[in-house]
Image (cartoon, rainbow, N blue to C red):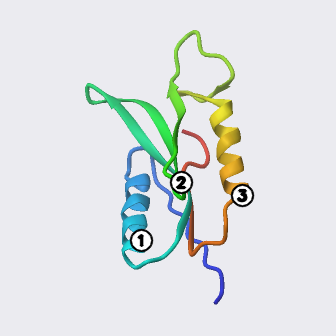
Amino acid sequence: MATKLTLITGPSGSGKSAWCAQHIEEARADRLDVGGVLSRPVFTQGQKVGIDLLDLQTGESRRLANLRSPESKGLLTKRWHFDPQTLAWANLVLRDLPPCDIVIIDELGPL
């Protein structure tokens, strides 16, 4: 079977991660093996304050990013301060991923 690549694009908050989560559930219901990483928003009082990253094979979750503050240093975007240890962990998750039917890599590009 040929490999198929699907890219989901859209502005921040448009539902890309939610779309991935829905399709992960559907794939698992069809007994497909899903691997990779999925971003999940962290909310406090209705405001998005962080991003967690979920290993879809093990269920382990780590904080990927927190809202940027004036004191933030390191891996920064306009809005987020990224944890380099979580990025390194995610790279290992993807590097060591066993063969599976579907691979999800959620969060690419500017945030």
Q: Is residue 108 above or below residue 7?
A: above
Name the side, left or right, on which 1 lies relative to 29: right
Give the position of the N terminus as an image quadrant: bottom right
Residue at 40% across, 59% down:
21
**Residue hosting label 2:** 58
Residue 96 is tagged as: 3
Residue at 50% across, 26% down:
66
Furthest residue toward front: 58
**Residue hosting label 1:** 28
Q: Position of residue 46 (x, y in %)?
A: 26, 30
Residue at 54% across, 28% down:
80
Q: Position of residue 41 (x, y in %)?
A: 40, 39
Residue 81 is tagged as: none
> Does dot 3 land on a helix, a strand or a loop?
loop
* CA neighbours of label 3 inside 10 A, class few (<14), some (14 to 19), many (20+): few
* Residue 79 can be seen in this image: no
Q: Is residue 34 above or below residue 108?
A: below
* Kind of residue at disc 3: Asp
Q: Position of residue 101 (x, y in %)?
A: 57, 75
Q: Nearer the viewer, residue 49 or 78?
A: 49
Give the Cα distance between marks 3 and 1: 20 Å
* Kind of residue at disc 2: Thr
> Does dot 1 land on a helix, a strand or a loop?
helix
* Kind of residue at disc 1: Arg
- Quadrant location of residue 22? bottom left
> Does dot 2 land on a helix, a strand or a loop?
loop
Residue at 64% across, 46% down:
90
Give the Cα distance between marks 2 and 1: 14 Å
Give the Cα distance between marks 2 and 3: 12 Å
* CA neighbours of label 1 inside 10 A, class few (<14), some (14 to 19), many (20+): few
